[in-house]
Image: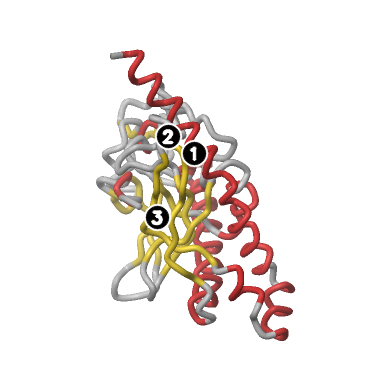
Amino acid sequence: MAKQLLIYDNATPVNADTHKDVSVKMSGTYEFSRDVNSVPIVAAEFLAAAADCVVVFAGTDKAVFPAVLLGVENDRNEYIDANGAWTGRYVPAFLRRYPFVFAQNPDSDQLTLCIDDSFEGVNTDGKGERLFDSEGMRSKYLENELNFAAQYQHQYLRTKMFCDRLLDLGLLEPAVANFTGDDSQPRRLSGFFRIDRAKLKAIEPDVLTEMFNNDELELCYTHLQSFNNIQTLGIKVAENSAKDQAIQ
């Protein structure tokens, strides 16, 4: 597992003074995510993400969070092509909300909407969508982005509770993913956690019922089912490697 938050190089609080003349022009590509091999996802994304990605838990034995594997090498995303277009079925919300992100004040629980000022689409030339109107009021575009970030944050907190339960129940174990590499040789990817199926089945009935009722049990089995996509990732690695060699 490698870097995740480094798609944000210069996250700056959005305000009418600093960004009064700023617009955002989205290119429609995900070039900014080319150098990440995993990104976080929230609970509401499990079913969609598991369509063609492997859902794992990244972190330590003290704190984890779900993530999707996007590559097997550091600094390489296998789910975008040479033009930056996404080649998978589902784009994680973590990437769709870019260049916006919530940042928490270290001295309080207050969240502030920030924008990555280093994003190439951020400009003062009037290209794309303005953040504020001529009177310094939030534009409809900014309001929509703020609402999306707020929804993501709500799901983040729900997902953190789910992860805390998994840790409390001792359900997670270090894991490896085995797949065939671009040279047709077996490869192993490690550095993440997965749910121990046997421990999951041994949960006390009352806890199991609670997890069923709040959909956490479904999340557990969706995560386990997603490991069937290991070979899908291996195929992407092989295909992209062949394209790289053809260009050279």
Q: Choose the circle earlier in sequence order: 1 or 3.
A: 3
| Residue 199 location, quadrant | bottom right
Is 85 on the left-hand or right-hand side of 200? Answer: left
Which type of secondary structure does the marked residue at label 1 adopt? helix
Residue 201: tell me if it is visible. yes
| Residue 40 location, quadrant | bottom left
Q: Do residues under tags 2 and 1 come within 8 Å of each other at their CB atoms?
A: yes
User: In the image, residue 200 lies at what x, y percent?
Assistant: 62, 73
Which type of secondary structure does the marked residue at label 3 adopt? strand
**Front residue of 207 and 228:** 228
Q: Choose the circle earlier in sequence order: 2 or 1.
A: 2
Circle 3 residue: 113
Which type of secondary structure does the marked residue at label 2 adopt? loop
For marks 2 and 1, give the CA distance: 8 Å
Circle 2 residue: 78
Is 48 on the left-hand or right-hand side of 32? Answer: right
Q: Name the amino acid, label 1.
A: Leu
Circle 1 residue: 233
Q: Residues within 10 Å of mark 1 (few under 14, many from 20)?
A: many
Q: Residue furthest top?
A: 247
Q: Residue furthest front?
A: 185
Q: Name the amino acid, label 3.
A: Leu
User: In the image, residue 13 lies at what x, y percent?
Assistant: 32, 53
Q: Residue at x 38, y 44 (%)?
A: 37
